[in-house]
Structures are given as structure tokens and as C-alpha cells.
Amino acid sequence: MDVFSPFKIKNLIFKNRFIRSATHDWMGNEDGTISDRQLALYKELARGEIGFIISGHSCVEFPRGRAGIRQNRIDDDRFIDGYKKLADVIHEARSLFAIQISHAGLQTNTNFTNGVEPIDHNTIDANDIGVLVDAFTRAAVRVRLSGADAVCVHMAHGYFLCRTLFSDSNKREDEYGRSIVNRSKIALGIIDSIRKAVGLDFPIFVKLNSTGGGDKHIEIEELVAVSTLLEEHGVDLIEISGGVVGSKDNPIDRLNIIRIEDEGYFLERARVVRKNVGTPLSVVGGIRSLSLMNEIIKSNIADFVSLSRPFIREPDLVLRLKNGQEKASCISCSKCRNFDGIMCVFNK
């Protein structure tokens, strides 16, 4: 068993254990629709034999749920056709596809929300929570109607659901605060509502923070508790990530990952989750070497390996590794994050 072996979740057969982790590409059309550049990007990724491709996060509510420029939207049925085209180009290459859905919460500003004040997870009331549950649920239904193979709910990187979960950001004193069970209520309510709407057979995945921003760390007991609750509520895969966008010393922005000792900065947290949860896991975060990827699978730390920046430099990385390349060429300079569209500076 290695990173090239197949895996099954519900009705999905993954041809290998590689996941292209959700990556915002700054390539969407100004109106939030899928662009021709995105169709070309995802076609190239799928042709590289990545087993499972997750889209960059699409906002479930507009305008206050939008996180940035040229972010894709999924808050209205008119966006479904674009995602159908995306699903088709990925399926043509026999890869699987999930759409990640999210709400910015406080991880945005009025420049991106057309002047509307962002919502604060610490002050919203029950009515607003109901609006958000409905927005996520309707977005998930659109994911299924588009022909995607799964929906991925974004609970990481400081966006709305991430900030509801953990004590480093949730300061509420009501039924949605204090205990980890209470802090999980909004997220679990969304998961339950999505499950009811999409049915038992449609996979629901979650991207979950295992650390806070910068030097802040989510307590490992909280991480285990949230992961256990997600399992109890029928989530089909948890991707372990961490960090908060824009925070100082954000681990997901770590530069110059050259030595294997520097790789896999969320592995220890994934290892603890695996000891407590039976749900399939993936882990992202600075993984570059094939030997480490295989060790993750063989030692049962996780069932999948998720990569982001390496697939920007080498969309065909899976084929390269299969043909003898020992590690990704990505040096983690993060210069690929370009407001005109992600691109590796070494590929110019």
C-alpha cells in the first residue's frame, strides 16, 4: 500500500491517494463565474493523474460572504453551468472532483463585500445563523447538481466556520460559545442540513484547522473533540490543515521547504486525530518527498496526501513521481500567489 494505491469512500473509487488541496487561483470571472482560464487549469491538473481535485473556495453568500477578488460564487443557481463544465473536464481525465464552499466571515473587508459590513461570528443572532445554514445548504445542493463528486465544507484558515469552532477566536457566552460542544453547534448544524438536502450517498468532506494563526495553537483536545463530532455527524473525509490567512508566521505560508525534516508541519496533529477518529483523513502542509508521502500512507497517519503549491509548479507531479522523480520541485517560495492568477515564477 502506497500513495499510488486506490481507495474507496462510499461510491467513489480514488485511483490514488493524491489530493489537490483547494487553492484560490484569482482566475474567476469578475462576476464570480468559472472562467476559461480555470477550465484550462483544471483540465491540466486532471491530465496529470491527480486522483482527487478540490476547487478553490466558492462563496455561499454574496456580497458579504466573499473573501477576495475574482473568487468564484455558488450563491445562485446561475453558477451551476460553470461548475458542470469544470466537472466535465476533470471527469474526462478520470479524476474525481469536489467543490469547496465557504463563507468569509471576518476574513474579508468592505472592498470585497461591496461596502457591506462583514459578519462577526461572535455577535450574529439566531436569525442570521439560520440564513447561513440555508446558504451553505443551498450551495451544497448546487454542488451535487453540477455533477461534482463531493462537497467540501471550508472550516479552516480563519474563515467563518473556522472562527466559530475554537477558543482562540470564539468568545461567545451563549449556547454557541464556551464549551467545544457549543462552539461546534453552527458547523454541525450546517453539516446536518447539508446531509438532509444532498442525501446519504453524497460525500461531505471538511477542511479543518489544526492550529490557529501564527504562534497560536488550537488545543489538541479541542481538535480531537471537533474531529470526533464531525465523525459522529457523518462527515466522510477530514483534511487536516491549519493557520489563518494573513496572520504573522502563518504555517501555511512557510517558505523554503528544502529538507525532508521541514516537511509535513501538520503531521503530528493528524497523527493524534487518527488515533481518535475512524473517518478517512488527508493531511496537507509542506509535503514534498515521495518517501514521506508513502510513509504517511503506510504508517496510517492519513489515507490521502494533499498538496497545493507543488501542483502549481508541476501539474503533472503525480506522473513525475510515478516515473522516478523523488520529490516535488517546488521550493515553497510562495511567489506563485499572484492576483493576476496563480503561476510558478520558474515556469515563465
Image (cartoon, rainbow, N blue to C red):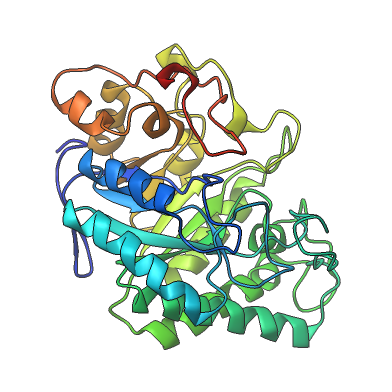
Location of residue 143 by image quarter: bottom left
In this rendering, is residue 5 above or below 81? above
Query: In the rendered view of the protein, which quadrant contains the N terminus?
Result: top left
- Residue nearer the viewer, 241 or 139: 139
Residue 173 image position (x, y, % from top left): 86, 71
Q: Quadrant of residue 21?
A: top left
Q: Nearer the viewer, residue 136 or 36?
A: 36
- Above/below status of 143 relative to 314: below
x 61%, y 30%: residue: 253
Quadrant occupied by the C terminus: top left
On the image, the x and y values in percent for residue 32 come to 57, 63
Residue 145 in percent (x, y) is at 35, 79
What residue do we see at 53% from left, 39% from top? 341
Residue 43 seen anywhere in this rendered image of the structure = yes
Q: Residue at x 69, y 66 (%)?
A: 65
Residue 308 placement: quadrant:
top left
Indicate the position of residue 316 as horizontal and vertical percent values: 26, 32
Q: Is residue 203 left or right of residue 65?
A: left
In front: 28, or 254? 28
